[in-house]
Amino acid sequence: MLAAPERPAPRRGPSIRRLLLGVGAFVLLVPVLAVTLLRIYETHLVEQTEGRLIGEAVLIGEAFRDAWWAASGLGDVDALSPAPPGHSGDELYPIEPMLSDAVGRLPPELPESAIRGERSGAAWLAGRAIAPALDRARRFNLSGARVLDERGCIVASTGGDVGRCLDTLPEVRDALAGRYRAVMRERETDSPTPPLGSISRRGSVRVSVAVPLFSGGRVFGVVRMTRTSLDPVESLWRHRGIFLLALSACLILTAAVTLYLSRRIARPIEQMAVAAEAVAAGRPRAPFAALGTVPDEVARLSESLDRMTDQLTERAAYISQFASNASHELKTPIAAIRGATELLRDDWEGMDEAQRSRFLAHIDADAERMERLVSGLLALARIEHAGEATPTGTPLAPLLRALAADYEGLVTLGALDERLVVAATADHLEAALRNLLDNAAHHGGGAPVRVEVACRGGSALVDVIDAGPGIAPAHRDRVFDRFFTTRRDEGGTGLGLSVVRAIARRHGGEISVESAPGRTVFTLRLPLA
């Protein structure tokens, strides 16, 4: 099975949980946003209607003012300021719309009003003067216009209710007191709902504004305008082109969000499935890690699958090599045992005691060699594939003194620092040092083996020095390979230095060798605890 090619690590995006929460929030936000925008739009339509009614009321009021001044027989009308109290005649005093969601709606029923018989005076004359203009204007804009005198009674109207007094209405009361007022009322009508394209409005809110008219600092009349506010559905119908464009944009946005999520979640999982199928079929696999930004869980899963597959591939290769090496190394002693056994079985009676003892000794030596091989291979396998090492510390000086004592004066120690504690387990550290000392003792030609200890860069350096003939340059790069030995005939397995290297690497260290005739130095480097 081939390992995956080098690949960039995926960029971790938000977790799937956050993505799903984001989708839920988006789905929840759409109707909430739609309702909110509809309410804002409806309020805007009410404000728009109020602003239009204010404009119409001001124009009708100015016409009524001129007619009232003329009917009152006032001489110098320029001396009469139309401004509200507290404002000069040259000052601007626009009327600002006041209706919003904060203003409640009044019931549709209008309060009872009395019809008063007095129809004389300047206000009535002015009302009759502008009545034809009001009637003509109503045919174009459908607004209800009523001009009231200073008592709140209608002197001109588009609704045919001249003479009725509206002084009990809240907006009229405020206007008679000199304050602009607008109100919203629920609309009730027995007429059928007009079509969307009709000039008549379908809204459920009727807007009423009352604009006070001033002359000489006092109120002499009120213009009350009413009109049904434009319904949001009706307004959208009139602007259906823009509405359809916005709806299309929302659909495109929804599709984009869906495709984005499917790409972020589904696509990486599909890639991992394809890679897993390739591994199962024995084909060279694609990387599990998806390119680009993927959800955090998917990124961690793909990285874990990559590491697991690499480890399995490495272990499969190790097992294959292990089996090949083991079969090769065991083949020779097995063949020797079988050969000796056959000879003993075929010619046991013809052999003297010395011959039989010699063959049995050969069988025992080969069996012992196989036992050492198997024990060494098992120890090496446990070290190389035993998972993460447990952080621990082992004092170096006491262990070296105990090992040197086992060699009965063959091993001498240099100066030892009692404070040095190596980040390695005691059994692993002992196995590594013992293998190094055994190797030096076998190749040192009987000369003493010297052990020097130093501390450098956060690591402990243990030099094992022998005075043997040295390692041939052709063999120097292979001394740490499994089963490589130059004393096979003496029972060497070629596993000792391999075990040392495995122990060093497992604990974050390394083993190196320098060799020349008369001096060979194996240096074991291990981090300090």
Image (spheres, helix red, strand yellow):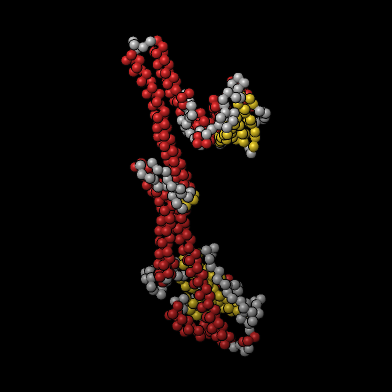
Residue 6 horizontal/vertical position (percent) = 46, 48
Residue farthest toward the left in the current orientation of the protein: 346
Position of residue 172 in the picture relative to residue 310 (left or right): right
Q: Residue at x 39, y 13 (%)?
A: 356
Between residue 200 and residue 157, name the one nearer to us: 200
Q: Residue at x 48, y 63 (%)?
A: 37
Can residue 497 be seen here? yes
Question: Quadrant of the rendered structure where residue 435 is?
Answer: top right
Q: How many numbered circles does the render carry? A: 0
Can residue 403 be seen here? no
Residue 285 horizontal/vertical position (percent) = 39, 45
Q: Residue at x 44, y 43 (%)?
A: 306
Q: Residue at x 43, y 47 (%)?
A: 5
Residue 150 horizontal/vertical position (percent) = 57, 77
Position of residue 341 in the picture relative to residue 473 (left or right): left
Between residue 442 and residue 234, name the one nearer to us: 442
Residue 416 horizontal/vertical position (percent) = 66, 28
Position of residue 93 in the picture relative to residue 113 (left or right): right
